[in-house]
Image (cartoon, rainbow, N blue to C red):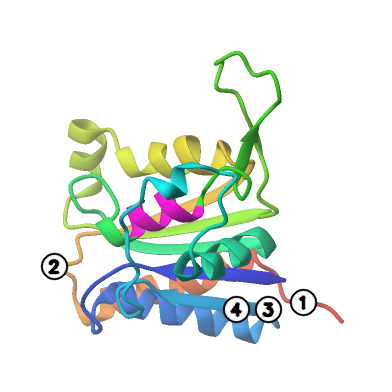
Amino acid sequence: MEISVILAHPERHSFNHAIAQAACRTLKRGGHTIRFHDLYEEGFDPLLSSAELDEQTLPPSDLALYCDELRRSEGLVIVHPNWWGQPPAAMKGWIDRAFRPGVAYKFEEGDGGEGVPVGLLRVRTAVILNTSNTPLERELDVFGDPLDNLWKRCILDFCGVKNVVRENFSVVITSTPEQRAAWLRQVEQVVTVCFPQVTR
């Protein structure tokens, strides 16, 4: 199974990096083909240009690789922190630019402005792994968990991905090494369940 793992966190020694590494190790053990991108390390430009708004125009060379991989991917693993109830700008820009019409979705010819999309992604399962420094109870009671709605309904369902699993690890800033180790085991378990070992 071809799986894209997309990470967005500026600090190389962050727990988000540890999560992404655990996910990649687990997928590799399962025999999957991994396409890993650390958006900050790669210097991904998050700014959507006006030229890219025209779906008839080929994406620029810096974006074409991401679009091609997204088209081919059968699975997605997304790793990022919760910043102000949103992904970091690098991840938001990757969504804005790579989830383009003709790649991730389309509208039927003659659409009268209803905005009901046809999802184009081949992705069968997406796993979203987030970190935060807000206790879960407060996140739900005060903020309503905006990341859950963003990924499951606003982005992935819109693009045809129906099976979305999301895990949030908090509170990271006060977590112990033992808690983090337990969370990484949880990452391995979730990834293994969502992407079973390839049988040849």
Q: How crowded is mark 3: few (under 14 residues within 10 Å), some or many (20 or more)?
A: some
The answer to whether residue 82 is magenta is no
Distance from disc 2 to disc 4, alpha carbons, whole Å, reads 29 Å
Q: Choose top left, top right, bottom left or bottom right for residue 154.
A: top left
The residue singled out by tag 3 in the image is: 32
Element type where label 1 sits in the image: loop
> Where residue 34 is drawn, which disc sits there?
4
Residue 130 percent location from the top left of the image? 34, 59
For marks 3 and 4, give the one nearer the viewer.
4
Q: Which is more toward the observer, 140 or 66? A: 66
Q: What stretch is highlighted in magenta?
A: 91-98
The residue singled out by tag 1 in the image is: 198
Distance from disc 2 to disc 1, alpha carbons, whole Å, reads 36 Å
Residue 122 percent location from the top left of the image? 70, 53
Mark before the other along the chain sequence, 1 or 4 = 4
The residue singled out by tag 2 in the image is: 173
